[in-house]
Image (cartoon, rainbow, N blue to C red):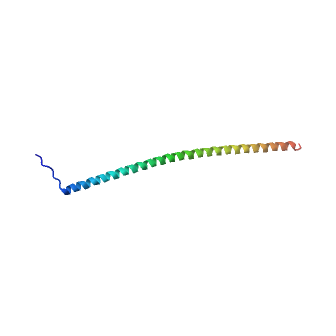
Amino acid sequence: MDKPIVISEQLQAQLAQATAQIEELKKKNEKEKVDMASKAMGLSLSVSDLQALKDKIKEADDAAEAGQYSKARLQLKAGVSTIAQADQYAYDLLAILPK
C-alpha cells in the first residue's frame, strides 16, 4: 500500500499563497490584454482617420491646383486678348495716319 502524502501546514500556506499570486497575475494579464486591444483599436481608428484626412487634403490640393490652372488659363486668355487689342490698336492707328 502507498503511503498517503502528508503536506505540512507551512507548505499548504505557501501553495495557497502561490495560487493566489497566480490568480492575481491572470487577472492583471487579462486586464492588460483588454487595455492593449483597446489601444490597438484606437490606433487602428487613428490610422483610418489619418488616411481619410490625407485623402481630403489631397482632394483639396487637387482642387486648388485645378483652380490655379483655371486662373492661369484665364490670365493667359486675358493677356492674349490684351495683346490682340493692342495689335489692333496699332493697325487702327497706322490706318489713320497720313500716308
In this view of the protein, which residue sits in the foreground, 64 or 6?
Answer: 6
* Picture residue at 33% right of the left edge, 51% below the top: 27
* Picture residue at 66% right of the left edge, 43% below the top: 70
* Picture residue at 49% right of the left edge, 45% below the top: 48
Seen as rendered, the residue at the extreme bottom is: 10
Residue 56: x and y, percent? Answer: 56, 45
Q: Quadrant of residue 16?
A: bottom left
Seen as rendered, the residue at the extreme right is: 98
Seen as rendered, the residue at the extreme left is: 1
Residue 92: x and y, percent? Answer: 84, 42
* Picture residue at 59% right of the left edge, 46% below the top: 60
Residue 36: x and y, percent? Answer: 40, 50
- Horizontal side of residue 67 vs 16, given as left or right: right
Placement of the C terminus among the 4 image quadrants: top right
- Horizontal side of residue 62 vs 77, given as left or right: left
- Horizontal side of residue 93 vs 52, given as left or right: right
Residue 37: x and y, percent? Answer: 41, 48
- Horizontal side of residue 70 vs 14, given as left or right: right
In this view of the protein, which residue sits in the foreground, 39 or 61?
Answer: 39
Placement of the N terminus among the 4 image quadrants: top left
Q: How many marks?
A: 0
In this view of the protein, which residue sits in the foreground, 76 or 93?
Answer: 76
